[in-house]
């Protein structure tokens, strides 16, 4: 029996599956084997969590609502749309049939994009000031949202950026972020938000720890 690997991820996009009627892969519909209107959910995570189609098809996703009761819904993975081991990024595709859920996710994605653009704008304006007039510190905030291995609400943890290490491999460029934000076993693949990052150009997920156990690392 293969071991169960637990990780986290972020819903990057959701859109109607207009190509064909698909059998929904959520836990409520899987046994019925009935084709119906479905939505494709793209989940950004790490390659060490989901590496290829074989792992994607064995994946079970829990979508957590913002509630104290720990309300959630489940879906199953269908395929891995993209994987980049250098950046430790993968894109998992899931299928859902709940129109209300799809609308909630789309609205939340729009709100998140607006919020991130606002934060970037404020950070850019602040960065242009004299050093003693800036509101942010050199050790920028690093916020991580992840699965907690316990039943309950979604969790975030907040820490500080320690340093950025630039990387290159053949034609690929990237960097490692080192930070002291708290994590747990289920944090692999969790979205990492660096204060002032360009949301359209930069995407970070939690990759693990350094040899210094106090520091965590993600890739870009």
Image (cartoon, rainbow, N blue to C red):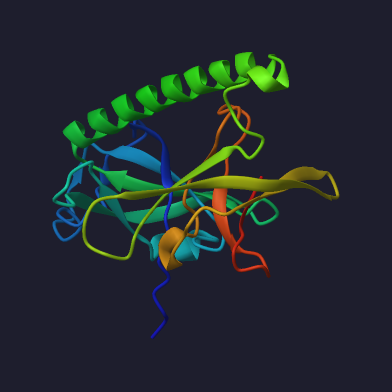
Q: Position of residue 39 (x, y in %)?
A: 30, 37
Q: Residue furthest front?
A: 132
What is the count of numbered marks?
A: 0
In the rendered structure, the answer to whether residue 72 lies left or right of residue 53 reads left
Which of the two residues, 190 or 144, is positioned nearer the viewer here?
144
Name the residue rendered at 37%, 29% in the picture.
Answer: 109
Q: Is residue 126 above or below residue 80?
A: above
Q: Residue furthest right?
A: 170
Name the residue rendered at 18%, 52% in the picture.
Answer: 70
- Residue 186's image quarter? bottom left
In the rendered structure, the answer to whether residue 133 lies left or right of residue 48 reads right
Q: Position of residue 56 (x, y in %)?
A: 44, 59
Q: Position of residue 80 (x, y in %)?
A: 49, 53
Q: Is residue 114 above or below residue 59?
A: above
Name the residue rendered at 43%, 19% in the picture.
Answer: 114
Q: Quadrant of the N terminus?
A: bottom left
Which of the two residues, 166 or 32, is positioned nearer the viewer here?
166
- Residue 96's image quarter? top left
In the rendered structure, the answer to whether residue 116 lies left or right of residue 38 reads right
Which of the two residues, 219 or 13, is positioned nearer the viewer here?
219
Q: Residue furthest bottom?
A: 1
In the rendered structure, the answer to whether residue 43 lies left or right of residue 71 reads right
């Amino acid at each position: 029996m293969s071991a169960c690997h637990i990780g986290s991820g972020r819903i990057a996009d959701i859109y109607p599956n207009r190509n064909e009627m698909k059998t929904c892969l959520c836990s409520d519909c899987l046994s019925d084997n009935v084709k119906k209107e479905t939505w494709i959910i793209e989940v950004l995570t790490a390659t060490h969590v989901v590496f290829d189609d074989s792992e994607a098809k064995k994946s079970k996703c829990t979508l957590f609502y913002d509630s104290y009761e720990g309300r959630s819904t489940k879906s199953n993975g269908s395929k891995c749309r993209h994987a980049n081991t250098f950046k430790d990024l993968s894109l998992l595709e899931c299928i859902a049939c709940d129109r209300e859920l799809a609308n909630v996710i789309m609205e939340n994605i729009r709100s998140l994009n607006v919020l991130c653009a606002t934060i970037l704008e404020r950070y850019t304006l602040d960065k242009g000031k004299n050093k003693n007039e800036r509101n942010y510190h050199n050790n920028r905030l690093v916020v991580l949202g992840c699965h907690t291995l316990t039943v309950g609400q979604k969790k975030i943890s907040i820490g500080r950026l320690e340093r950025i290490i630039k990387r290159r491999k053949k034609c690929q460029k990237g960097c490692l972020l080192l930070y002291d934000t708290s994590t747990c076993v289920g944090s692999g693949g969790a979205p990492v938000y660096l204060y002032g990052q360009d949301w359209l150009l930069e995407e970070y997920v939690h990759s693990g720890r350094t040899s210094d156990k106090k520091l965590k690392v993600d890739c870009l």
